[in-house]
Amino acid sequence: MKIATKAKRMGMMNKTVKVFLILLIISGILNVIFLTYIFQLRKYGYNKEQHESEIGGEDIDLMMNPLRREKEALEIVKGEDGSEIDTVPYVEVEVRPKPVSIPKAQWPKGARGEFCNIVIKALVDIDGSIIEARIFKTCGSQKLEEAALVAAKKAKFTPAQHRGKLVRVWLIFPIKFAL
């Protein structure tokens, strides 16, 4: 600020001084932003040694990119032709899986006469089989939930496709217990 005052007094507020002052202000703003970012990284547990990547010696903060962290945590699977298969499950795909067969759930003993719909969230593999199944919405009967999961794991679907590749995808479908 002393420079601006002196320049005004001397009547020499030329373009060079204006540019210098603007750069000085921008530099101060960038320093504040940088220090705020560093403070937030430290606050939320950033550890440089823990998050260094071996790719090109660059420091990549995997904590800030959960999709990459999840993808790197999964194994690389090779197809029969030697190509890599994407093991990260998709949520949105171009071609959704269609049911080929969803077996009827067997009523467990002691649960006869109970009626409900249980909604299953399942991970469909690239061959259309179910890798993992979870209860998404329940009716409150643990016996029926277990029977629904057994039936869901036997279900078959057409594989999902995204950009011409077969991919894993999460899918939601009902299992009905009714007469």
Image (cartoon, rainbow, N blue to C red):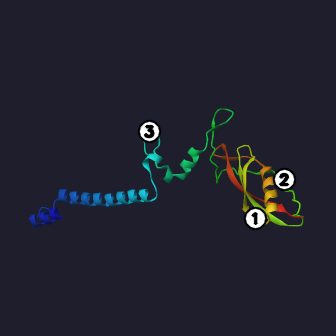
Determine the CA span between mark 1 and mark 2. 19 Å
Determine the CA span between mark 3 and mark 1. 48 Å
Q: Specify the amino acid type for callout 1.
A: Thr
State left or right for residue 179 relative to residue 91.
Answer: right
Q: Are marks 3 and 2 in contact (CB under 8 Å)?
A: no
Determine the CA span between mark 3 and mark 2. 50 Å
Closer-to-camera residue (141/25)? 141
Number of other residues with Cα within 10 Å of mark 1, as a class: few under 14, some 14 to 19, many 20 or more: some
Residue at 42% x, 57% y is 42
Between disc 3 and disc 1, the foreground one is: 1
Between disc 1 and disc 2, the foreground one is: 1
**The quarter of the displayed image where residue 138 is located:** bottom right
**The quarter of the displayed image where residue 74 is located:** top right
Location of mark 3 (residue)? 56
Location of mark 1 (residue)? 138
State left or right for residue 104 relative to residue 68.
Answer: right
Q: Secondary structure at mark 1?
A: loop
Percent position of residue 68, x then y: 54, 48
Q: Secondary structure at mark 3?
A: loop
- Of the 4 image quadrants, the one containing the N terminus is bottom left
- Of the 4 image quadrants, the one containing the C terminus is bottom right
Location of mark 2 (residue)? 103
State left or right for residue 139 relative to residue 165.
Answer: right
Percent position of residue 101, x then y: 82, 50
Q: Specify the amino acid type for callout 3.
A: Gly
State left or right for residue 3 relative to residue 89.
Answer: left
Residue at 61% x, 41% y is 75
Residue pushed farthest top?
81
Closer-to-camera residue (153/94)? 153
